[in-house]
Each structure stands twice: as C-alpha cells, then as structure tokens.
Amino acid sequence: MNIENIVDFSHANTTPEHYVPAPEKILKGNPEQTVYNHYNSPCGQLSAGVWEGEIGQWTVNYTEHEYCEIVQGVSVLRDEDGNAKTLRAGDRFVIPAGFKGTWEVLEACRKVYVVFEQKV
C-alpha cells in the first residue's frame, strides 16, 4: 500500500450515478439524486463519496451508519415521530443504522458521506 492508493475526491474520475427514490417513497417533488461513490472498501462494508439531491421529500430507512457533511444547500431530516433537524452547509453529523423517517431537500443539497454497512 502506498500514496497511489489514497483517494482524493477532488481528483477522482468517478462516473456519476443518477437516480430517484422508488415512487412509493416519494412524498413530494421530484427528488432527483446523483451520487459519486469515490471509494468502496475491499470488504464491501465501507463506502465514501459525494451525494447531490434536488428539491423534494422521501422516506428513509437506514440499514447503515452514515457520516455526513453538508457542503451546500438546506435539508430537513425528520424522524418517525415528526421531530426535525434542519441541515445546512457546514453541518456534520452521523445517522445511526436503524433511523427511519424522511429526508427533505429545501435547497439543492450536496453532502460528503462515509457509509458503514454492518454485517449481521
């Protein structure tokens, strides 16, 4: 392992993946999303990259632990009880596996993420 193995997001030549949540998950808008998954660990449990989301709201059910850093835009994360947290550029947080609720993008959003999928 050497310096050549370092993944520099600013120089990564990652093909973007464009998608929308499944129709039954969309609550409002047309939340088109793009992910640049810059890194996958050999074991398949860890990935990291950049996510972009357009205005809309959809349900979420996290089976993975996710560290996020919002670098642009505004989103609102709500739990199943309706408690809300507004997320803006500069916010850093972890969403634990098992979280259920909704993600709403109010202003086009961009985040850096690191995801860990725990093996059962």
Image (cartoon, grey):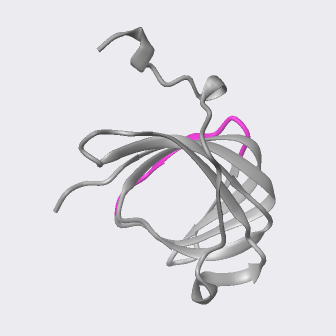
Q: Is residue 81 above or below residue 51?
A: below
* Residue in front for this viewpoint, 14 or 88: 14
The quadrant holding residue 21 is bottom right
Classify residue 46 as left or right of residue 78.
left
Relative image position of residue 35 (x, y in whole percent): 61, 52
Residue that appears at 75% across and 82% down: 28
Q: Position of residue 116 (x, y in %)?
A: 34, 48
Q: Which residue is drawn at 29% across and 48% down?
A: 45
Residue projecting furthest to the top: 3
Q: Range of the magenta residues?
A: 88-97
* 104 to the left or right of 115: right
Q: Does the magenta stretch include residue 92?
A: yes
Can residue 113 be seen here? The reply is no
Residue drawn at (70%, 67%) of the image: 104
Residue 79 appears in view: yes
Q: Is residue 61 magenta?
A: no
Answer left or right for 55 relative to 11. Answer: right
Foreground pick, 51 / 105:
51
- Above or below — where is 31 with respect to 3? below
* Residue at the far right in the pictured view: 107
Residue 98 lies, in percent from the top left, at: 35, 66
Label total for image: 0
Q: Which residue is drawn at 69% across and 35% down?
A: 90
Q: Quadrant of the C terminus?
A: bottom left
Q: In the orientation shown, which residue stands out farthest toward the left?
A: 120
- Percent across and percent down for residue 50 are 61, 43
Give residue 30's quadrant in the image: bottom right
Image quadrant containing the N terminus:
top left
Residue 8 in the image: above or below residue 14:
above
